[in-house]
């Protein structure tokens, strides 16, 4: 028997009207959105979820899949009385947001896709994820992903925003190995969801750090090309963690998306 985990849903800002629901990247949790939420216009309700097995969320018994994560996010939001939201996902959170748009079109009013992509992994990337998942499971530590801040941060941040490496390391170190392994296996199994964007009826905003090497500008342009009317914001001097490296710029893009979705 499998169980849908009851995910932790954090209210980062109290407000009214259409809420913004933020979905974090890997191997992080809702804390990556703290600065973005603080920079959003007042009056907007801002929530951030912890994906299964990460942050304060239990893992539950579902086999690893982005679809299960998306279903669990929507179940958690509905349990909190939220029937519709602007869903914003960063990287892995973007994979979850796209799956939510595909599976729960009535829930996802607008999509914010931050430093993410719609394509599936190639064989080499998939094998690498499974290798990392096995290493994390066998060692029962997150050692295999502790080096990630070097790839997550842009070249400018690594020099000019030195405190961010330690901040990311602290977030990663606090994750549970079983949640990290589950997320890697879920991402390895995800399909290409480019077509979801062509069918999505609401507004779409795509945001990418100019120095993002994991999901570079080309991946963002691919998203924009697939989604009729989508906007693209390129954040200067920021990498894959643009939402942390330049939170006001990302908040500005999310605020614009919210304003369009609300009308
Ligand atoms: C993330 O930031 O969530 C990861 O880079 C996603 C991935 O590994 O594809």
Image: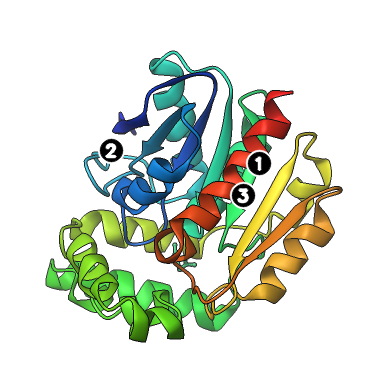
User: Relative to residue 97, is residue 153 depicted above or below?
Assistant: below
Q: Is residue 3 visible?
A: no
Which picture quadrant has residue 199? top right
Is disc 1 placed on a helix, strand or loop? helix
- Sequence-first tag of 3 and 2: 2
Question: Which residue position is annotated with label 1?
Answer: 256
Disc 1 and disc 3 in contact, CB within 8 angstroms = yes
Distance from disc 3 to disc 2, alpha carbons, whole Å, reads: 34 Å
- Sequence-first tag of 1 and 2: 2
Which picture quadrant has residue 3? top left
Query: Residue at 39% of width from left, 26% of height from top?
Result: 76
Quarter of the picture containing the C terminus is top right
Say which mark, if any, is on residue 60.
2
Question: Which residue position is annotated with label 3?
Answer: 253
Query: Residue at 21% of width from left, 70% of height from top?
Result: 169
Q: Tell me the mark number nearer the camera, choosing from 1 and 2.
A: 1
Apparent side of residue 214 relative to residue 193 in the rendered image (left or right): left
């Amino acid at each position: 028997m499998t169980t849908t985990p009851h995910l932790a849903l954090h209210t980062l800002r109290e407000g009214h009207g259409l809420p913004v629901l933020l979905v974090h990247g890997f191997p992080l949790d809702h804390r990556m959105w703290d600065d973005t939420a603080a920079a959003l216009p007042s009056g907007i309700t801002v929530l951030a979820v912890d994906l299964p097995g990460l942050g304060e969320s239990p893992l539950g018994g579902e086999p690893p899949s982005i679809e299960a994560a998306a279903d669990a996010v929507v179940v958690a939001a509905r349990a909190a009385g939220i029937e519709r939201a602007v869903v914003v996902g960063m990287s892995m959170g973007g994979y979850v947001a796209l799956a939510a748009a595909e599976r729960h079109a009535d829930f996802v009013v607008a999509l914010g896709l931050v430093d993410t992509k719609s394509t599936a992994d190639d064989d080499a990337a998939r094998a690498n994820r499974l290798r990392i998942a096995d290493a994390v499971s066998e060692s029962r530590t997150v050692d295999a992903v502790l080096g990630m801040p070097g790839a997550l941060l842009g070249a400018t941040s690594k020099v000019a925003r030195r405190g961010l490496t330690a901040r990311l390391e602290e977030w990663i170190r606090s994750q549970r190995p079983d949640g990290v392994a589950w997320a890697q296996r879920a991402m390895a199994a995800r399909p290409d969801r480019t077509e979801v964007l062509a069918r999505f009826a609401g507004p779409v905003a795509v945001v990418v750090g100019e120095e993002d090497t994991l999901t570079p500008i080309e991946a963002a342009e691919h998203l924009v090309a697939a989604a009729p009317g989508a906007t693209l914001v390129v954040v200067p001097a920021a990498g894959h963690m643009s939402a942390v490296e330049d939170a006001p710029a990302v908040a500005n893009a999310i605020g614009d998306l919210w304003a369009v979705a609300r009308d």
